[in-house]
Image (cartoon, grey):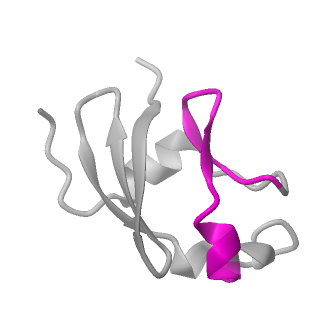
């Protein structure tokens, strides 16, 4: 099964709540991942909050930044398959 993010909701700071197609859900804190040319602009919270679900499968931003859904799945806290 390919992992996809099916829902995402901004929480605060650099935290997002995610629901995956395998039923897992939880909070991801991306604050330690915002380095490098593509991710630095996301340190601006207004930019960070502007994410979308690219192709319906992962977090994506207008500047081309995105995170692999598998990476996000590994980062969730409080995961529990439904």
- How many labels sit on residues? 0
| Quarter of the view holding residue 45 | bottom right
What percent of the width, then of the height, locates residue 68? 60, 44
Decide which of 56, 1 is in the foreground and name it: 56
Relative horizontal placement of residue 57, taking residue 22 as reference (left or right): right
**Quarter of the image where the C terminus is located:** top left
What percent of the width, then of the height, locates residue 43? 68, 82
| Quarter of the view holding residue 3 | top left
Q: Does 52 lie within the magenta span?
A: yes
Relative horizontal placement of residue 82, taking residue 7 as reference (left or right): left
Q: Residue at left 51%, top 50%?
A: 71
Q: Is residue 23 above or below residue 17?
A: above
Q: Is residue 22 above or below residue 51?
A: above
Q: Is residue 23 above or below residue 74?
A: above
Relative horizontal placement of residue 54, taking residue 74 as reference (left or right): right
Q: Residue at left 55%, top 31%?
A: 57
Q: Does 60 lie within the magenta span?
A: yes
Q: Is residue 75 above or below residue 64?
A: below
**Quarter of the image where the N terminus is located:** top left
What percent of the width, then of the height, locates residue 11? 37, 69
The magenta stretch is 43-62
Decide which of 6, 78 is in the foreground and name it: 6
Q: Residue at left 76%, top 56%?
A: 65
Q: Residue at left 50%, top 76%?
A: 14
What percent of the width, then of the height, locates residue 76? 33, 58
Relative horizontal placement of residue 26, taking residue 13 as reference (left or right): left
Decide which of 14, 77 is in the foreground and name it: 14
């Amino acid at each position: 099964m390919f992992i996809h993010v099916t829902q995402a909701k901004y929480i605060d700071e650099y935290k997002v709540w995610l629901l995956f197609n395998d039923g897992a859900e939880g909070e991801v804190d991306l604050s330690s991942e915002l380095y490098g040319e593509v991710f630095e602009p996301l340190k601006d919270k207004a930019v960070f909050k502007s994410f979308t679900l690219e192709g319906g499968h992962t977090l994506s931003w207008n500047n081309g930044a995105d995170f692999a859904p598998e990476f996000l799945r590994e980062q969730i806290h409080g995961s529990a398959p439904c």
